[in-house]
């Protein structure tokens, strides 16, 4: 249920006047912005050329941004990190809330005597309301350009404007209504269209600790989509960006409608549900869909809305899920089967995988993975070779039809592969952390470096780029086919059949790998227990990013 206008006004006053702001800029919940930036039946504002509703508030509500603090996987992961290093509880929780509950952090986190800052997520208070509002309007639009694109701004160290300005891409905005209803001033800020804005939370470094909470003295770069993008053909940095140049916003808040046409519309309506007479249609107008690669959590939010106190409708969450799957299928990768040779009883071929994104694939938190499923069939459709098949739980199967040992907590880590000549082998693209002793770990605060990182590089990635050292692949030495933008995996298999053969290849993907889920469920916390219940009820089958087929 949305906060009422009365409560919203009270909340704004409380945060400004009771000391909770800690001498910083004010923040307000999304319900304040929804007064003018949600769709209304009698207003033409915030609609595309086909009349489809595209108001920022309405599109945002069903996204991972709006539900960042409700995300049950994130909550479980934070609780597991605290369980692993209890002496660093406050530091862990503050760091994680910095980007997942940013407004509460800006207002001033309080444990209310519980000993845990995570209490704010369930707290029945104005601060709790802010926390559960996730990555909301007055955070992203309140970030100044100071320090953007530098290490000083990474890991959630953005700065909000102290003059209560909210930035957007338009010159001379009609400011009176916003000033009257929110005491914020709409202002031109072209940095809102810069990838460096997104980099503030999506470039994350953490300190390395042992189980007793002792610092190892190193910083670990857990996720770095921005640095990966900088070192790619998609970057618009520099004096001469290429034809592929695109910002994070170009893909994740597109200024074109579903049919590819540029959107031009009024950017707000009045609180009474009609258009503001002084406003005129403008561009650019970004659709706040924030579609990424997460298909698991939107399911959980949709199916457990009451338990997670989700405010978005089931239809809004389903729209996010559908859009995510469409993006994964259409804009993420390409697969082809090449160099096929059948000689005597041997079949050799290669699967060529291309990364179409502007960062590593997968990118972000190392929970994610992709892998190749390759099946060879005879003329009767019988399977004579299979690699990368899964069971109904999304676990990769071995030659014996059982989940591979690498799918279980504590099991071996899949190596990078150039050649597959046994059905039990599989080509994976993933990142696994290593602790200070070089051992694989799935605990973030133990992470000191990468044990393996063979995620597909973006096109144009160069070892000579300043960002290369921080994003270089690990454990792929000697693989000449693993290059910027693509990889090629060779297959050599027995094919005794005299009939015609068919080769099927698919690149599969999970936003939460079965292995990472198994590691997470080793921890005994209430948050992990809740996650496990939701996870076991969810559709855990992998998403299909791209397919190819070859027939004799």
Image: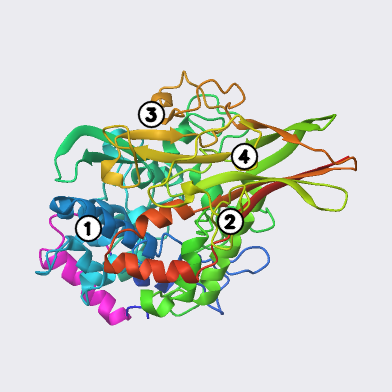
Report the coloring of the rendering. Answer: rainbow
Q: Using the image, tell me which numbered label, if any, was put on residue 203.
A: none
Q: Using the image, tell me which numbered label, if any, was put on residue 356.
A: 4
Q: Residue drawn at (80%, 52%), measured in percent from left and top?
A: 382
Total numbered labels placed on residues in the image: 4
Label 1: which residue?
Answer: 105
Depth-wise, is mark 1 or mark 3 nearer the camera? 3
* N-terminal label among 4 and 1: 1
Dot 4 crowding, Cα within 10 Å, few <14, some 14–19, many 20+: many
* N-terminal label among 2 and 1: 1
For the residues labelled 1 and 3, the Cα–Cα distance comes to: 28 Å
Element assignment for label 4: loop
Q: For the magenta stretch, what is the residue range?
A: 4-27
> Where is residue 161 shown, x and y percent of the image?
26, 50
Element assignment for label 1: helix
Depth-wise, is mark 2 or mark 4 nearer the camera? 2
Label 2: which residue?
Answer: 542
* N-terminal label among 2 and 4: 4
Label 3: which residue?
Answer: 470
Q: Could you tell me if residue 71 is visible in this image?
A: no
For the residues labelled 2 and 3, the Cα–Cα distance comes to: 29 Å
Q: Is disc 2 in contact with disc 1, using a CB cutoff of under 8 Å? A: no
Q: Is disc 1 in contact with disc 3, using a CB cutoff of under 8 Å? A: no
Q: Is residue 10 magenta?
A: yes
Element assignment for label 2: loop
Dot 2 crowding, Cα within 10 Å, few <14, some 14–19, many 20+: many
Left/right of residue 407 with respect to residue 435 in the rendered view: right
> Where is residue 107 shown, x and y percent of the image?
20, 61
Q: Is disc 2 in contact with disc 3, using a CB cutoff of under 8 Å? A: no
* N-terminal label among 4 and 3: 4
Dot 1 crowding, Cα within 10 Å, few <14, some 14–19, many 20+: many
For the residues labelled 4 and 3, the Cα–Cα distance comes to: 21 Å
């Amino acid at each position: 249920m949305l906060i009422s206008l009365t409560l919203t006004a009270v909340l704004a006053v409380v945060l400004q006047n009771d000391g909770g702001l800690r001498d910083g800029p004010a923040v307000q919940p999304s319900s304040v912005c929804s007064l003018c930036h949600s769709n209304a039946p009698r207003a033409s504002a915030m609609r595309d050329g086909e009349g489809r509703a595209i108001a920022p508030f309405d599109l945002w509500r069903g996204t991972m941004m709006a539900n960042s603090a409700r995300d049950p996987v994130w909550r479980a992961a934070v609780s597991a990190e605290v369980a692993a290093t209890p002496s660093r509880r406050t530091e862990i929780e503050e760091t994680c809330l910095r980007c997942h509950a940013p407004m509460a952090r800006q207002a001033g986190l309080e444990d209310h005597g519980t000993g845990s800052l995570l209490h704010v997520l369930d707290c029945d208070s104005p601060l709790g309301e802010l926390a559960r509002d996730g990555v909301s309007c007055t955070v992203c639009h309140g970030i100044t350009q100071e320090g953007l694109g530098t290490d000083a701004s990474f890991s959630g160290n953005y700065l909000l404007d102290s003059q209560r300005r909210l930035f957007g891409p338009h010159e001379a905005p009609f400011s009176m209504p916003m000033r009257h209803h929110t005491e914020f001033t709409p202002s031109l800020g072209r940095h809102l269209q810069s990838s460096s804005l997104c980099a503030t939370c999506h470039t994350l470094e953490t300190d390395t600790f042992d189980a007793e909470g002792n610092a190892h003295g190193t910083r670990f770069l857990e996720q770095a989509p921005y640095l990966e993008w900088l070192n790619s053909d998609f970057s618009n940095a520099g004096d001469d960006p290429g034809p592929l140049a695109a910002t994070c916003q170009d893909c994740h808040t597109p200024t074109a409608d579903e049919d590819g046409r540029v959107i031009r519309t009024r950017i707000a309506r009045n609180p009474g549900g009609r258009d503001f007479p002084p406003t005129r249609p403008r561009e650019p107008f970004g659709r706040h869909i924030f579609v990424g690669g997460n298909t698991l959590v939107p399911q959980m939010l949709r199916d457990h809305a009451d338990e997670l106190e989700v405010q978005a409708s089931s239809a809004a969450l389903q729209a996010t899920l559908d859009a995510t799957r469409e993006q994964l299928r259409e804009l993420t990768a390409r697969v082809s089967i090449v160099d096929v040779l059948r000689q005597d009883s041997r079949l050799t071929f290669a699967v060529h995988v291309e990364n179409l994104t502007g960062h590593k694939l997968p990118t972000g938190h190392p929970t994610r993975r992709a892998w190749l499923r390759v099946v060879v069939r005879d003329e009767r459709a019988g399977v004579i070779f299979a690699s990368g098949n899964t069971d109904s739980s999304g676990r990769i199967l071995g030659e014996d039809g059982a989940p591979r040992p690498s799918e279980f907590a504590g099991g071996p880590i899949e190596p990078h592969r150039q050649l597959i000549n046994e059905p039990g082998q599989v080509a994976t693209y993933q990142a696994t952390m290593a602790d200070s002793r070089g051992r694989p770990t799935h605990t973030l605060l133990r992470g000191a470096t990468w044990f393996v990182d063979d995620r597909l590089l973006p096109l144009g990635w160069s070892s000579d780029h300043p960002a290369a050292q921080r994003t270089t692949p690990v454990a792929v030495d000697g693989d000449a086919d693993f290059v910027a933008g693509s990889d090629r995996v060779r297959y050599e298999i027995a094919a005794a059949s005299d009939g015609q053969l068919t080769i099927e290849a698919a690149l599969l993907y999970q936003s939460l790998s079965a292995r990472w889920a198994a590691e997470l469920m080793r921890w005994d916390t209430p948050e992990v227990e809740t996650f496990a219940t939701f996870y076991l009820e969810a559709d855990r089958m992998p998403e299909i990013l791209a397919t190819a087929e070859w027939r004799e």
